[in-house]
Amino acid sequence: MIETSSSRWQDDLVCPRCRTSLRHTPDGGLQCGNCALASVPFPVVGGKPVLVDFSNSILDRDAVLASAAASPIRRGGWRALLTRAVNGTNRIAPRIAQAMLARLAMPGTHRARVLVVGGGAIGAGAEALYAAADIDLIGFDIYASQTTDFVADAHAIPFADGSIDAVWIQAVLEHVADPGRVVAEIVRVLRPGGLVFADTPFLWPVHEQAYDFTRWSPSGHRWLFRDFAVIAAGTSSGPGTASLLALRYLAAALTRSNKLGQLLTLPLVWLRLLDRWCAPRRSLDAAAGLFFFGCKTDRPLDLKGLVRFYDEQLPLEAAARSGNIAQTKVEGTASTPPG
């Protein structure tokens, strides 16, 4: 059952297959009234609806229900603690969170909806979004948690077209089978001029086991978000972090133990501090992670613009390093801010 606090957005939930508005069942569940999924209500696990078209998803219905929508990957414990110590904090995400909130608070806009794709846990640096009282923050993931409002597959986001003001997708796109389709879904659910922040790995080893599929260079990442005008973009972690990760995985491979690999590289955590002193061009070309912050545009990037973007990366990276995240209207976006 969806909580009362979600009443401002629950009417925009749609069937993940046919995108028909969902109706409420007498017991407070949700059901499609149009397509083949209408035969039974969507499952509810721990009070959270599971809005998944299982016939077109990596998720298995029986496994989801049997596990009470638990994560397929073990989380927390020593792995989380050591990973946080080795990888450090995200220096970009807090700045983007503040910039996103500032844009969403522009005069004349309504109460904004921010959708966290992959919101099973609070992303590093995203805390300001969760603390904001003047937005509706909506989170979903392929597993249920205290920070998710429902379970869903990002390949079929169960929200109506143009019903979301901003999307936050952090360390997720590498874990989906079809990233282009997921980004297309983000474009679909965003209002004209809607915002997106994505933080995605480039030179980062495989993590989350079988659920890790893809990597992007800076230009490849930009092309993935070609339906957005760029506000800010650059490295979220650079060559120092990439070197530390490579050594960590080398140690794990040699010792046949991920835990030992983490422990042996703890004395080398200073390597990630070198990210701050790396030359921008070389840092971009050998980044561990990349970020993109942009506005939905009616002038998508073309291939010639993609080639030009390689040189445009440098001033964008310089602005990100200085903390100067642009707040002005971006050419090619809707004439009004989200909302």
Image: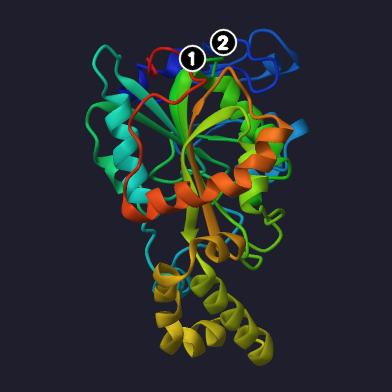
Looking at the image, residue 335 lies above or below residue 306: above
> Residue 10's quadrant in the figure?
top left
Estimate the x, y position of residue 337 in percent, counting from the top left.
38, 18
Q: Nearer the viewer, residue 34 or 174?
A: 174
> Residue 253's quadrant in the figure?
bottom right
- The answer to whether any part of residue 1 appears in the image is no
What residue is drawn where x is 77% and y is 32%? 55
**Residue 153 image label:** none
| Of the image marks 2 and 1, the number of the one nearer the N terminus | 1
Q: Which quadrant, please, contains the N terminus?
A: top left
Total marks shown come to 2
- The answer to whether any part of residue 209 appears in the image is yes
Can you identify the residue that label 2 sits on?
21
Can you identify the residue that label 1 sits on?
12
For label 2, the crowd category at 10 Å Cα-Cα, with few meaning under 14, some 14 to 19 and many 20 or more, is: many
What residue is drawn where x is 62% and y is 79%? 249
